[in-house]
């Protein structure tokens, strides 16, 4: 089958995994990618994209590929342009089914499947579901009962199928294929990689709070083995010759045993500096020492709010000021640079609590400070709380569900101090690098009425969110633009490709002993060995015990006093 994927804004590791997996099953895969320089969340000037590429280039490439199916992946704040392009594709290729996956349709399936441009949506992980779907299409069989999919039939009826178990182990998947994004120049000299799926925590503002609740019967968090990760890194280093790596895991180093093995292998076989994410509670001496020994040069740590009350009662981040300050001191002690991250515009937040973020940040000695505006991602615990308590109107929530705004530019809550949200968000990165003797000047600007001054400061200083990354992207932008135009104008797929109905034994991520028993098939290739089952059972018991003791899953309950 000829499978066309689409994404915009940045490299997407999840899509790289799915494309690699589907390609391994004998399908012809192609990607259309848009860098979205004019509407990337930081700025909202869509016509700016026309200086580099246009819709005609995008649409013509899709038409030339002649896809059997078109696949989109969407997060909420990228959903609007994705839906608009899907409408164009559906108009020009009405008989080609279009499927959209990602966290947006997973959290809003009813709203998404109503769109005429989408024939199917994928809820949760896509590898197994897409494999089943494509095999059914190959064999011209009905696919209305594929797990993880909601499918419209010819009458318009939507078949809402149950979700399938999460994929484990992650090593059962092939390595993510970065070549598709590389063609568009989307890979910088700091290449991204992930070692996990999921997060050990459930912060109320994050999509993980929704996902953990949806998979409350399973532990969604999984981590690839060190051997698997290093093999991936070795190949990436050989092929793309990066200068650094960025581990994009929500929390990279939460497993001391894993890190102890990783630091030895990484230093010996990779030896490049890297950046990763920690939390105040995982930034322990042993973890930070291991990261430093491996070659880590900087870490991002989410503070989110300077108000201890907001962090603990509203965000479900049980970190005291003292814990955060001590973590920052340990990070500095081990020679790592700290990027501190904050969010403004939470429900109940006052200007006094916003100011506490500035005060706390002054005690952290952060190399960079990133600031964002609370974006009520649909179905997250804090978005639902905002609706239930009158902070988020139905009209604004509907706009969010449509994909309007971003966590850089939009405050959607009905707050009495909305202008303060924009001011504090705009000026924190500048405040962080301003000498102490100049800060009284910035404090006076903060007290001024919100105006063009604050907007200008934000526009000129948003590179300070991560200045090193900004410089890398500016230097490599001309190459990316040229590569994007080249990739859209030229075709790289196998012109002689013929789908010969490639078929193989079901993959490891679908095959189970239970299925084998149902089919009364007991051949070795269909049965998982007993020692593997025993090992998996023991690992599950250990993870369940650890999960119960330390990590929060399920529905979040707020203190009514909030």
Image: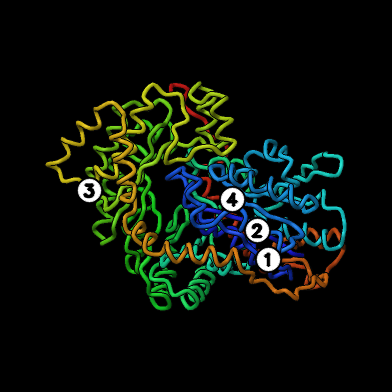
Count all numbered tags in the image, as a single digit. 4
Mark pair 2, 1: CA separation: 8 Å
Left or right? Give the position of 242 relative to 2.
Answer: left
Q: Mark 4 — residue? A: 219
Mark pair 3, 1: CA separation: 46 Å
Q: Earlier in the sequence, mark 2 or mark 1?
A: 2
Q: Nearer the viewer, residue 162 or 534?
A: 162
Q: Nearer the viewer, mark 3 or mark 2?
A: 2
- Residue 535 image offset from top left, x and y in percent: 62, 64
Q: Mark 1 — residue? A: 29
Q: Nearer the viewer, residue 174 or 28?
A: 28
SS for callout 2: strand
Q: Is residue 226 visible?
A: yes
Q: Mark 2 — residue? A: 5
- Residue 428 image offset from top left, x and y in percent: 29, 41
Q: Earlier in the sequence, mark 4 or mark 1?
A: 1
User: Do the residues bearing badges 2 and 1 touch, measured as CB atoms within 8 Å?
Assistant: yes
User: Could you tell me which quadrant the N terminus lies in?
Assistant: bottom right
Q: Is residue 546 visible?
A: no
């Amino acid at each position: 089958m000829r499978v066309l994927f689409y994404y915009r804004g940045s490299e997407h590791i999840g899509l790289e995994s799915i494309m690699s997996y589907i390609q391994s099953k004998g399908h012809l895969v192609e990607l259309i990618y848009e860098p979205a320089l004019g509407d990337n969340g930081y700025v909202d000037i869509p016509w700016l994209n026309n200086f580099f590429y246009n819709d005609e280039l995008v649409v013509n490439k899709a038409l030339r590929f002649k896809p059997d199916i078109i696949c989109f992946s969407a997060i909420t704040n990228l959903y609007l342009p994705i839906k608009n392009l899907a409408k164009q594709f559906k108009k020009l290729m009405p008989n080609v089914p279009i499927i959209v996956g990602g966290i947006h349709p997973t959290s809003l399936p009813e709203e998404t499947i109503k769109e005429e441009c989408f024939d199917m949506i994928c809820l949760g992980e896509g590898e197994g579901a897409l494999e089943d779907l494509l095999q059914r299409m190959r064999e011209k069989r009905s696919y209305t009962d594929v797990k993880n999919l909601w499918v419209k039939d010819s009458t318009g009826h939507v078949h809402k199928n149950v979700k399938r178990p999460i994929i484990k182990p992650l090593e059962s998947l092939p390595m993510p294929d970065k070549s598709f994004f590389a063609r568009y120049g989307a890979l910088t000299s700091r290449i991204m990689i992930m070692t996990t799926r999921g997060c050990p925590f459930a912060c109320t503002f994050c999509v993980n709070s929704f996902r953990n609740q949806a998979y409350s019967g399973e532990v969604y968090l999984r981590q690839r083995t060190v051997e698997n990760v290093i093999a991936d890194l070795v190949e990436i280093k050989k092929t793309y010759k990066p200068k650094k790596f960025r581990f994009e895991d929500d929390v990279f180093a939460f497993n001391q045993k894993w890190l102890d093995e990783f630091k030895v292998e990484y230093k010996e076989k990779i030896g490049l500096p890297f950046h990763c994410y920690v939390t105040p509670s995982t930034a322990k001496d042993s973890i930070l020492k291991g990261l430093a020994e491996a070659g880590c040069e900087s870490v991002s740590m989410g503070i989110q709010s300077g108000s201890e009350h907001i962090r603990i009662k509203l965000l479900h981040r049980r970190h005291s000021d003292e814990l955060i300050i001590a973590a920052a001191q340990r990070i500095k002690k081990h020679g790592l640079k700290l990027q501190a991250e904050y969010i403004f515009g939470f429900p109940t937040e006052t200007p006094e609590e916003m100011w506490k973020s500035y005060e706390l940040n002054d005690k952290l000695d952060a190399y960079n400070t990133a600031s964002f505006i609370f974006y009520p991602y649909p179905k997250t615990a804090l978005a639902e709380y905002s609706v239930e308590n009158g902070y988020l109107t139905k009209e604004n929530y509907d706009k969010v569900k449509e994909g309007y705004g971003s966590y850089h530019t939009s405050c959607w809550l009905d707050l009495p101090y909305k202008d303060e949200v924009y001011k504090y968000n705009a000026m924190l990165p500048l405040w962080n690098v301003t000498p102490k003797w100049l800060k009284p000047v910035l404090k006076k600007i903060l007290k001024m009425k919100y105006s063009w001054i604050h907007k200008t400061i934000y526009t000129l200083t948003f590179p300070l969110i991560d200045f090193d990354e900004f410089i890398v992207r500016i230097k490599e932008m001309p190459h990316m633009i040229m590569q994007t135009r080249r990739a859209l104008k030229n075709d790289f797929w196998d012109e002689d490709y013929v789908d010969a109905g490639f078929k193989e034994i079901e993959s490891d991520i679908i095959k189970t002993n239970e299925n084998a028993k149902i089919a009364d098939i007991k051949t070795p290739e269909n049965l998982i060995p007993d020692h593997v089952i025993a090992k998996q059972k023991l690992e599950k018991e250990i993870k369940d015990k650890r999960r119960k003791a330390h990590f929060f899953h399920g529905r979040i309950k707020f203190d009514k006093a909030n």
